[in-house]
Amino acid sequence: MGGCLVLIYHRVTELENDPFQLAISPAKFKSQIEYLKKKMHILTLGEFLNRIKQNDSLSNCVLITFDDGYADNFIQAKPILEQLETPAVFFITTGMINKNKEFWWDELEKLFYSTQSLSSAQLAHIIRKKYSWDINHSENRQNILFRVHRYLKILPYEKREKVLDDLFNLVEHNRNSIRPTHRIMNADEIRDLSHQEFFEIGSHSMNHCAFKSLSRSASKHEIEYSKNVLESISGHSIVSFCYPFGLKHDLSRRAARMIRKAGYSCAFTNIPGLFFRNDNIFKISRCLVRNWDVSELKENLLINYS
């Protein structure tokens, strides 16, 4: 393996509904980390950046990253990583810190799975797209959920919030009711993580919007203000940024330039593949990890990207 395998985790927990497949059970997560430690060299972010700067080898190296900032990163993942003395980088969506709300895709899941009162006609009226399927039929629900997710993903923050407010008002469901399983890390937990030997904190923007949908001023705010917030909480310089969603069609050249100008040293995408020393350090490739046992981890990542 000539390049570094950068892994994307989101959640370490077990959920009743996980339509976007973000969660990994603590037992499987521990098994994955134990295997990776035996087979590969797991880098800190500092080691990763120093190897690139000094033109050292990235062969057989792994960098572990977490996106979004879910509280289970602190409650479930942190003790496992500490026990195994394993470094990781946690990318935080700073607009969610100490806010009485869930991530918008979790709010969608709550609307689709926790209530039976949202009809396809109501949904079509709010987002102005026609859905003929019965939303309360289990075989249709997830398909429509994914379609609505794709629609909301490309909206600027204010428009997305308006759609969600309208949807929650329709079903008379409290948008500010946070499930303990979907809580975001608070400032004290983020501060604790940032002071641990094995962990680094990075920015995942303010509001988790695809940069393709944002104006220049909105992009600048997402990039710069999120850095300021995290530096204020942690007391450390924040050198890494992670693009929301992060696939090729979600990125923009303007955002990459702004990230560099804001003082970050690197930026991470969700574009799969290994990262090699001569690749663009502001468009670092990463590979998504699912709720796999070790054999599935090897089949999906270590074989495909070796």
Image: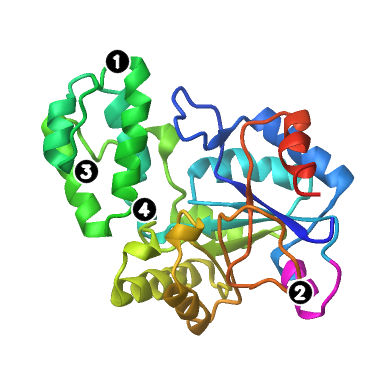
The picture places residue 164, in percent across and down from the top left corner, at: 21, 43
- 43 or 304, which lies in front? 304
Q: Secondary structure at mark 4?
A: loop
- Residue under label 3, please give it: 164
Of tags 3 and 1, the one toward the viewer is: 1
Is there CB contact under 8 Å for labels 2 and 1?
no
- Residue under label 2, please give it: 52
The picture places residue 220, in percent across and down from the top left corner, at: 37, 76
Say whether disc 3 or disc 1 marks the residue closer to the N-terminus.
Answer: 1
- Residue under label 4, please give it: 98
Magenta stretch, residue numbers: 47-57
Say whether disc 4 or disc 2 marks the residue closer to the N-terminus.
Answer: 2
**Distance from Cα at disc 4 to Cα at disc 3:** 20 Å
Q: Is residue 10 left or right of residue 215?
A: right
Of tags 4 and 3, the one toward the viewer is: 3
- Residue under label 1, please give it: 137
The answer to whether 128 is drawn above or below residue 46 in the figure is above
| Residue at 37% across, 64% down | 212
Circle 2 residues within 10 Å: few <14, some 14–19, many ≥20: some
**Distance from Cα at disc 4 to Cα at disc 2:** 35 Å
| Residue at 54% across, 72% down | 235
The picture places residue 22, in percent across and down from the top left corner, at: 52, 37
What secondary structure predominates along the stretch shown in magenta? helix
